[in-house]
Image (cartoon, rainbow, N blue to C red):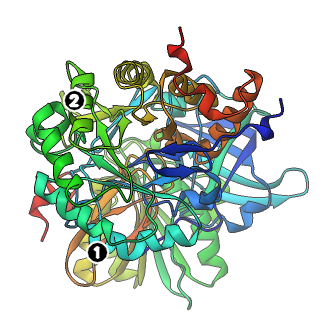
Amino acid sequence: MSTINKAALQRQATLIANKRIGAYHQIIFSVGDVVRHCKPGNFIAIAVGGDSSKMILRRAFAISRTSENAQFGGTVELIVAPHGSGSKWLCAQQEGTEIDVVVPLGKAFGIPTEPANALLIGGGYGSAPLFGLADVLKSRGCRVDMVLGASVGSKIYAPMEGKRSVNSLKIFTEDGSMGETGRVTSQLKEIITEREVEIIYSCGPMAMLQAVTEIASSLGVIHQASVEEAMACGIGICMTCVLPIRGEDGTVSMKRSCIDGPVMDGATVCWDLVGKSTENFS
Amino acid sequence: MSAHSVDISTTLGNAWFPAPIFTASGCASSGKELAQFFPLKDIGAVVTKSVMNKPRHGRPTPRMAETPSGMLNSIGLQGPGIDAFLANDVPWLLAQNARVIVSIAGETADEYGVLARKLRSTPGISAIEVNISCPNVENRGLVFATDRDTSCRVIDSVRKVIGGEIPILAKLTPDVTNIVDVAKGVIDSGADGLALINTVLGMVINIDTMRPHLGGKTGGLSGPAIRPIAVRAIYQVREALPTVPILGMGGVSSGRDALELILAGASGVSVGTASFGNPTAVISIQNELRELLAQRGFTSLKQAIGYAHRV
């Protein structure tokens, strides 16, 4: 049985940077020593709206990068799309603001013990945590190829410095405004075969993760998917962020994406059953 | 008066608790996650998520919708079933020196009796919360607490098994015309106390899909938005049944809110949704409450219970 991330702490963190990058905001928090426990795939849960907020639930964001420096100590970076009221509030905060955070949460991406050929697939701002992951994989001697996709070019997140750890980067947009026209899955079979990919890491919308799972499974490649399901708490107590997962014994059960994920073995997620009545579970 | 000299211990029936702030059922799972943030023995009790006889998957996603100062949930009593719960969760909680109140839910009055029998043979439990008011069941007819007679049948089947060893708390819904009538009924049937209130039935429609947002269509509204409903329900029941102990809950997110429920008549207060937004809410509310009692000159929590009713 899975448990909450043992390093998780609640603390006041200082927002030290808030920059607009295309359609997104790059937000950096000073979090102190706990940064050493923040791994690619982990997330942070942030209280939004201030003390008298009508928004009572935390917002969860993937940690895209971490660093330690003399001036700010440990810092974590998030890439935020200002879509809902909570993320818009966060993106409007000034540098120097103190914000209540819980970090790190969730299961991290598993890193191969031996150098391997890895393919990282990101949809929209789902690419953000993949750059931190690329650094770690590269430092372990892995070959790292990346495929990113979005509806339009302005929604592709691919910072210059992030590309250093990537051997190749291929971009697809549905309207052809950046890279090739198509989706991340358009040439996926060919890429996996040509590059002799041994492990796939993905982060993005549910439909993309499902499509990647189908191709990865058909070729017998390991696939770690970072899922995004609405969470009320992020710490495992509310049971809202569940996904149907097939266990080793073949039975399906609802697992919390905040505790058992967000990184899941894609092949165990019953994507077709998401949102379906649980009476159909076998 | 210093805050630390205020006696904040409380009782519900024959159960004693060193502190009056508890977790709320369904908002702390079985305590393991919150234990990462504070020692569970420091609060009054952990009220565990309502458990049924058999394991249950619950409702499909989406299960949650945030609303102004509140949220809807539609979990549908997902859980491991009573046998796994008693084998794993209760021993773990007792090993933390936490007080444990077990919440039970059934599809029939008989199922509650079966659950009560299994609890009776489990040592160390402080009380039973009989959840007859979960709104997230397939058939609204199963919300026993919307009807006095069906509520009484459930309490009766639990009372036949539990003979006064531990208190039976009946958890009621505010979604009724006359909550006092249901309260009187379950007390007559043998409940030792009441848990007030469960979530309020609600719905959110997604304006993009133009359909109900939740997988289960309806959900239970919780959070500060429902606090005045809880205060009203507790006040009305206390007025009608002044000797019946009440465990109050509904949108409590500060010491001030907890005090409000206590003044209305609650002997203890469960904190639920506030823990989702703040994992240390339960312990901070307890500390704030102690300060507020001291500032008002109370030397014990018991003096404040129902104080709003004084003539």
Left or right: residue B169 compared with residue B177: right
Q: What residue is rendered at 25% in x and 28% in y?
A: B202
Q: Position of residue B200 (x, y in %)?
A: 29, 29
Furthest residue in direction top, as rendered: B311
Q: Position of residue B292 (x, y in %)?
A: 71, 27
Rendered image: mark on residue B20: none
Which residue position is annotated with label 1?
Answer: A267
Corner quadrant of residue A269: bottom left
User: Is the residue under label 2 in contact with that under label 1 (CB below 8 Å)?
Assistant: no
Q: Is residue B40 above or below residue A190?
A: above
- Quadrant of the drawing holding the N terminus of chain B: top right
In-front residue for pair B171/A55:
B171
Which residue position is annotated with label 2?
Answer: B182
Name the element at disc 1: helix
| Mark 1 burial class by Cα count in 10 Å: few <14, some 14-19, many 20+ | many
| Mark 2 burial class by Cα count in 10 Å: few <14, some 14-19, many 20+ | many
Q: What residue is rendered at 36% in x and 22% in y?
A: B233
Tally the marks. Answer: 2
Q: Chain of mark 1?
A: A
Q: Is residue A162 above or below residue B286?
A: below
Q: Is residue B136 above or below residue A50?
A: below
Q: Position of residue B166 (x, y in %)?
A: 39, 56
In-front residue for pair B25/A221:
B25
